[in-house]
Image (cartoon, helix red, strand yellow):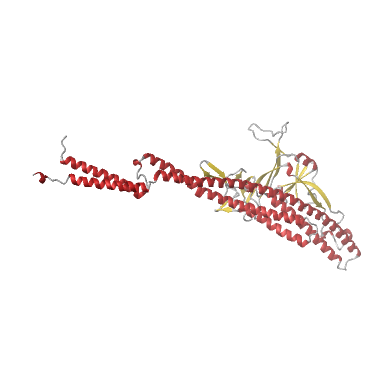
Amino acid sequence: MRITNKMMTNNALYNINTNKNSMSKLEQIYSTGKKIQRPSEDPIIAVRALKLRTNLSEINQYYEKNIPDAKSWMDVTESALNNVNDILKQMNTYCVQGSNDTLTKEDRNSIVTNLTQLKKQVYAEGNAQYAGRYVFTGYKTDTSLVFNKNETDYNYEIEESLTGTGIESIKKTMNSHDLSDYDPADPGNSNLDTKPNMVNTYRLQLAYNNLKTEDDGGKIEISYPRLDANGDYELDGDGKVIYDTFNGNIVSVKSTDAEAYQPEDGEIQYIADTGELIFSDDVYADFKNLKEIKVAYEKDSFTEGELRPENYFNCTVTDKIDADKEPIVYTKANQEINYEVNFNQKLKINTQGSDAITHAIGRCIDDILDSINAVAAVEDKIAETEKMLESGSNTSEQTAALNELLETLNTELTLKSEVMQTSFEKGITKLGKQQNVVNIAVADLGSRYVRLELTESRLSEEQVDFEDLLTNNEDADVVEAFVKLTSQQTIYNASLSAAAKVVQNSLLDFL
């Protein structure tokens, strides 16, 4: 085969260009530290890099954003629940202190002040927020758990679900007397014929007081599940529980009425101002074993600090200002806020207020405060009567009437003091139960928090592992790249030297 000068020249240039390309690739690997610069150079590395980068990006999202956000939410929730627990402990301490019958009026006044403030604070904790979102209100993160101001623009039709075991036996003092029962102009006819006495009755306490009466256009309905012959709930054709409405007599009374807390047979008294249902003995016997008692009632006036019904009950809200506005229907449901904290793994981060901060706390404190105030009112009446007796200007008939009034008031004081002692003792038990509710909520939150920390730890390890895999897949060995580049430079220089020798003769050398 004849080799021409042109063939040699072309071969030399081709080899020089090939060596130059190889040196250029090695120079890029050495300069960038990456094995490839474009997918076409090695599709396997490119595809694997895309997958690893996607996985690492998701891990970073979970580890650096989702989990810290979830932990912060849960930290705020735990802090609020711990504060509620501490407040309940303080309330319990005051109840223990108040059950001591040696307390003076000033001591009881101090307890009233402290319990009032603690009651406000325990519900204020329910308005805890994280990043502008309320943590105890389920999906309604833009709505507070309690009313932040007095609210009178809306009417709430509330359906509260209770149980027969919630009916409690209470003591009430009846036939109270006042200074108006004494007439100094006609002391012989003073209205002191009836004497204070104690009655035992059965009460089902609703979540709210100051409810609408039937005279105000409000409603009160009581229903319960119908049971079949086996004692199971009776269902309709759609599989829903059938409820029977109480067909006895529901009587609306005020707590100040003489007949209040003394229902007739077959009767339930509805005391709207205190939010109580008082059962006669026979009705109590029928209701005490019921697993569910539904009570539907209305309330259109809320004070600052009261819990919003929509967070606790099925209710319908009507705008009293704009009658054309459609009513809003709320259905109580389990509203879990779940964060995705790992691949196909979600974790509940919220605790609903209805699971920890209940109406029972405030209602228990209301009972205690009412009993303390009742005792204080009688003590004031006794002090005024004693002052009238000490005036020295009374006739014998007036003195006798005042002494009779004083004796009656002392009897009333004894009875109301007994009621107060009972309310303190019940408060210890009730607040203890509420502490258990809060502790269960804290324990549940804590268990989920531990799971979150374990997931965070695992993601931290996975983040390191994926970064190592990504490095091994994409990054070049700099030392190896330098050695190869140096070798390729030598080869390239050699090709230049060889080409110089091959193409150094010209046409003139052959003439």
Horizontally, residue 396 falls left or right of residue 225, namely: right
Q: Work out whether residue 186 can be spotted.
A: no
**Observer-nearest residue: 414 or 429?**
429
**Observer-nearest residue: 494 or 244?**
494
Dividing the picture into quadrants, the one containing residue 115 is bottom right
Q: Work out whether residue 106 can be spotted.
A: yes
Q: Quadrant of the C terminus?
A: top left
Position of 30 relative to 184 (above/below): above
Q: Position of residue 333 (x, y in %)?
A: 61, 43
Check the image and name the residue furthest to the bottom.
392
**Observer-nearest residue: 503 or 21?**
503
Q: Position of residue 141 (x, y in %)?
A: 57, 49
Query: How many tags in the picture?
Result: 0
Q: Residue at x 25, y 48 (%)?
A: 493
Q: Quadrant of the N terminus?
A: top left
Q: Position of residue 121 (x, y in %)?
A: 65, 56
Q: Residue at x 53, y 48 (%)?
A: 67
Check the image and name the residue furthest to the right.
396
Q: Residue at x 14, y 45 (%)?
A: 505
Dividing the picture into quadrants, the one containing residue 337 is top right
**Observer-nearest residue: 488 or 428?**
488
Horizontally, residue 32 falls left or right of residue 247, namely: left
Dividing the picture into quadrants, the one containing residue 374 is bottom right
Horizontally, residue 195 falls left or right of residue 93, namely: right
Q: Residue at x 64, y 53 (%)?
A: 82
Q: Position of residue 457 (x, y in %)?
A: 53, 47
